[in-house]
Image: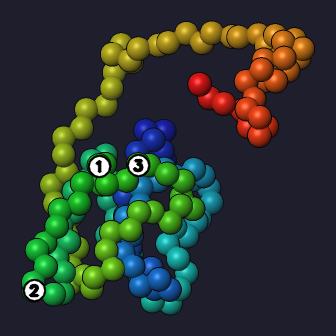
Amino acid sequence: MKNGILKKPISAIYFDGEKEIYYVKRFLIENVDKEEIFISEHPKSQLEIIATDYRPIAEVQFSKRSLENIEVNFEEFIAVKGIKAQGNQLTKEKVKQVSLLDSLPYEEPKAEDMEVVEEEVLEANSEEDSTSKESTDKKDDGQITLF
């Protein structure tokens, strides 16, 4: 695989057979040499749709006619998480169909457009200093205050 593909998120909508809920998830391929299962292994679980675009959009059509179709903007709906993450709940309603729509435009950031921020290394003071500060910041019940 090309190095650029590894940085491109995989977006998916799947049905978890055990919980009987539809989920949305986004993740990066962490290890190209290892085959991984990214939805639950329950016999009723199924992958509804998968996209490899940067900013995909999907339309969800429900079985109940009284429910309006919804558009799912994966980028806004869920952050990119690990491959093992369950994802965010989409719906408990029965889904008739999931369709990919045209993805939103995406431009890869150019190296010259990226801002590089220098790291500042802070050295810790001696243990005495930090211990004395903690003791002065504690309330009567032993809890450290934030402000």
Secondary element at tag 1: helix
Task: Give x and y (percent) for residue 64.
Answer: 15, 87
Task: Give x and y (percent) for residue 67.
Answer: 13, 79
Secondary element at tag 3: loop
Looking at the picture, the colour scheme in use is rainbow
* Residue beneath the point at 33% across and 26% down: 109
In the displayed structure, 57 sits above or below 6; it is below
Q: Which residue is mark 2?
A: 65
Q: Earlier in the sequence, mark 2 or mark 1?
A: 2
Which amino acid type is marked by label 1? Glu
Instruction: Say few, some or many: other residues with alpha carbon within 10 Å of mark 3 (under 14 / 14 to 19 / 20 or more).
Output: some
Q: Earlier in the sequence, mark 3 or mark 2?
A: 2
Q: Which residue is mark 1?
A: 76
- Spatial separation of the CA atoms under disc 3 and disc 2: 30 Å
Task: Give x and y (percent) for residue 138.
Answer: 75, 29
* Residue beneath the point at 45% across and 79% down: 16
